[in-house]
Image (tube, helix red, strand yellow):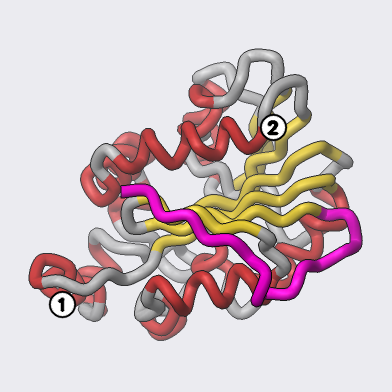
Amino acid sequence: MAKKSLMYNHPKVYDLILKFLHGNSLKERYEIISREIGSNKKVIDVGCGTGKFAQFLDKTCEYNGIDLNEKFAEHAKNKGLNIKTGNLLDEKNYSQCDVTLICDVLHHVIPNDKKLIEICMNISKKTIICEPFTEDGFFNKCGGIFQNSRLFHNLLGEADGVNTFEDMKEWLAHDRDDVIMLLESYGAKRTIIVGGDIIGIIENNGIQQKSGNNKNVILQ
């Protein structure tokens, strides 16, 4: 297995970098996802990381998480969360639930992103996906310099011990329209844009809505 960056070796560092990258939109996206889930639901947070989302979930819901990173899973367990360590692409690691959440994960499992979504759709009534996109602008272009640096990737960036630099670089080049089209191809009926992220909602009822009828909401 490849080496992990500092970000993926230390849970607290991961949480700090996540907050730095997303700013206020981090809290906002979690609140939106929580509203989409509602109450009295069994939720599986796929690739849950440190379990950050759990604190935003309605108290009547049952939170479950799975992550490949043993340090992250242990950190989350120490907070009293129901987390297991396991391969996200093995359907045996899942049970039936109301909602599956895939947040900041798909770019870590390529080229198996569709397989993961299919697993989630098979075990839940609703799948919620949240993925970042690359924005235009001076500061974002400056950030892209680091994003395209193999050294930065390996030391502080997205080196999770699984993905290659080339895979991550290709995915993170997606702009807003690219990610919306991708989520629609997965079956998302609605997309919500918040900060530098796009949230896609898939109702797993066996009926996929044509992408031309999808509704996009932009939150400033």
Q: What element carries label 2?
A: strand
- Which residue is found at the position 67% from the left and 63% from the top? 188
Q: In which quarter of the image is residue 193?
A: bottom left
Question: At 65% from the left edge and 43% from the top edge, which residue is drawn?
Answer: 66
Residue under pointer 2: 64
| Closer-to-camera residue (179/68) | 179
In front: 136, or 100? 136
Residue 46 numbered tag: none
Q: Is residue 208 magenta?
A: yes
**Residue 104: % across, % down:** 48, 55
Q: Is residue 84 left or right of residue 141?
A: right
Displayed quadrant of residue 64? top right
117 falls in the magenta region? no
Bounds of the magenta span?
Answer: 204-220
Label 2 neighbour load within 10 Å: few <14, some 14-19, many 20+: many
The spot of residue 65 in percent (x, y) is 65, 37
Q: What residue type is labelled 2?
A: Asn
- The residue under label 1 is 145
In this rendering, is residue 114 above or below 206?
below
Q: In which quarter of the image is residue 35?
A: top right
Amino acid under label 1? Answer: Ile
Report x, y in % for residue 85.
Answer: 65, 43
